[in-house]
């Protein structure tokens, strides 16, 4: 099994008659290209366990999402397929997750708005109390000033009109001075009492001015506190409405999720996935489906890496690139005879990349995971004319006939010269779908979706 690789490896297994005419002239080019690729990759054994891949950085996550979204926008319409119910569950799972996130955020925002409203209400109550106290102080200062003014007026009049000893004796408790001379005493009385009362009156006047200023400040503070309180009440009401909408949307998404799961639990077995299935799209099955199906077959892989790792890589790489990694897994099973051929064992090559009809082997990749990535990347170049990749190309020569093959059926005589190539891939994949359906009928696999739109970091 082999694939064309653009200008360097373009002579492999497509358009059988034309390809065979060109094989002899290009065989040496293929060998040279293979040798060059082997020289620049790791020499570690193909089947050996590799160190865990480091989690993507925020920048890498952004690039992955960019590639995923750009590719999924190009997904063509596809005919009805037995694996459609899986897509419905995947979509409703994602919608329920997104709705749950929105609900959580809405509840938090509503709680925060309620807290802000409470703080604003507390400040308003404080402002009302301070305004009340300031008003009382202003009123008391006003009364005090009026009293002192009345006393000043009264004392002044009495100082002038009182001329007897009896009048002087009445004021001895208030003033000190020479009272032996009534006339002099009256003068001293007038000056001292009047001076004292003027001081008291001035003090009362200053107190009133201060009280009035404090009341103005308290009034202004009250106005601001009232405006803030009203605004916080409105925000709290808006956030409460948002929360109610988010809760309703989440409940609706959960109902849709339950309905999709119910339909999947009762989907019929035995259907064949059409060749018109698109290369572009999110995987509909999960890694547990792929690995479980493989374990149930009679295939005897010759690799030491657990098949579960391969299944996960196909799903993860498919997710990142917006490609059907689940069907690519079936393609790899066909190409490698169940991960048992020499390309698998010696080259980490699971889809005949660079393995022309007369070539001893295909291209070699540095690790099993990179071999899976190379397959997904090459498929993307077949499906998309100007692809945006989630990761750097595993090999700079991974280029197929740009945008030639939007569906898996289009790969027949293009990816491989076998005229029944796509039907064979779809037959294997249809068997995996049946296995996955049997798991869903048993209530398994619903809570371990591998296909999901990546969140924005």
Image (cartoon, rainbow, N blue to C red):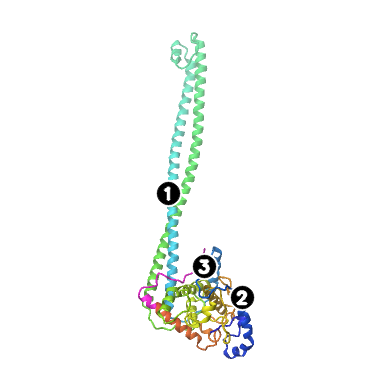
Query: What residue is disc 1 on?
Result: 118
Q: How crowded is mark 1: few (under 14 residues within 10 Å), some or many (20 or more)?
A: some
Going from N to C along the chain, the mark reached first, 2 or 3, is 2
Which residue sits at x=49%, y=45%? 224
Residue 402 % position (x, y): 59, 79
Quick one: 409 or 300, which is closer to the camera? 300
Name the chief secondary structure element in magenta. loop
Q: Give the spatial CA distance, label 2 vs label 3.
A: 23 Å
Quick one: 277 or 40, which is closer to the camera? 40
| In this view, the mark in front (1 or 3) | 3
Disc 2 secondary structure class: helix
Query: What residue is disc 3 on?
Result: 53
Q: Give the spatial CA distance, label 1 vs label 3.
A: 49 Å
The answer to whether one can see residue 352 in this image is yes
Disc 1 secondary structure class: helix
Quarter of the view holding residue 250: bottom left
Q: Give the spatial CA distance, label 1 vs label 2.
A: 70 Å
Quick one: 33 or 329, which is closer to the camera? 33
The residue at the far left in this view is 442
Q: Residue 190: which numbered mark, if any?
A: none
Query: What residue is disc 2 on?
Result: 39
Residue 418 % position (x, y): 52, 88
In the image, the segment drawn in magenta is: 437-457
Q: Give yes or no for residue 452 being in the magenta stretch.
A: yes
Going from N to C along the chain, the mark reached first, 1 or 2, is 2
């Amino acid at each position: 099994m082999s694939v064309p690789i653009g200008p360097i490896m373009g002579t492999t297994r497509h358009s059988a008659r034309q390809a065979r005419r060109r094989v002899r002239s290009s065989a040496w080019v293929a060998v040279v290209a293979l040798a060059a690729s082997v020289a620049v990759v790791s020499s570690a054994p193909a089947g050996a366990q590799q160190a865990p891949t480091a989690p993507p950085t925020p920048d890498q996550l952004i690039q992955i999402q960019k590639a995923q979204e750009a590719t999924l926008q190009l997904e063509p319409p596809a005919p009805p397929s037995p694996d459609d119910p899986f897509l419905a569950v995947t979509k409703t799972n994602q919608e329920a997750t997104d709705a749950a996130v929105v609900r959580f955020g809405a509840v938090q925002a509503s709680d925060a708005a309620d807290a802000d409203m409470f703080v604003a209400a507390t400040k308003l109550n404080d402002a009302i109390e301070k305004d009340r106290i300031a008003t009382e102080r202003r009123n008391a200062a006003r009364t005090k000033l009026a009293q002192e003014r009345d006393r000043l007026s009264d004392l002044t009049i009495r100082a002038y009109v009182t001329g007897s000893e009896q009048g002087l004796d009445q004021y001895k408790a208030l003033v000190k001075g020479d009272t032996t001379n009534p006339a002099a005493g009256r003068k001293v009385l007038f000056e001292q009492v009047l001076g004292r009362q003027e001081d008291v009156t001035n003090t009362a006047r200053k107190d009133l001015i201060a009280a009035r200023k404090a009341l103005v400040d308290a009034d202004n503070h009250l106005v601001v506190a009232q405006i803030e309180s009203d605004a916080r009440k409105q925000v709290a009401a808006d956030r409460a409405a948002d929360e109610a909408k988010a809760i309703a949307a989440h409940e609706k998404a959960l109902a849709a999720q339950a309905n999709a799961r119910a339909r999947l639990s009762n989907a019929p077995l035995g259907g064949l996935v059409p060749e018109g299935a698109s290369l572009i799209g999110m995987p509909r099955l999960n890694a547990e489906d792929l690995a479980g199906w493989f374990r149930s077959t009679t295939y005897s892989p010759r690799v030491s890496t657990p098949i579960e790792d391969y299944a996960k890589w196909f799903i993860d790489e498919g997710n990142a690139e917006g490609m059907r990694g689940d069907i690519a897994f079936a393609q790899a099973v066909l190409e490698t005879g169940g991960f048992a051929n020499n390309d698998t064992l010696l080259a980490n090559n699971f889809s005949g990349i660079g393995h022309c009809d007369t070539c001893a082997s295909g291209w070699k990749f540095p690790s099993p995971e990179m071999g899976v990535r190379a397959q997904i990347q090459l498929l993307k170049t077949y499906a998309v004319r100007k692809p945006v990749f989630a990761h750097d190309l595993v090999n700079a020569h991974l280029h197929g006939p740009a945008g030639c093959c939007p569906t898996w059926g289009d790969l027949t005589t293009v990816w491989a010269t076998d005229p029944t190539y796509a039907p064979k891939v779809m037959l294997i994949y249809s068997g995996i779908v049946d296995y996955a359906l049997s798991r869903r009928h048993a209530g398994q696999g619903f809570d371990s979706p591998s296909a999901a739109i990546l969140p924005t970091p």
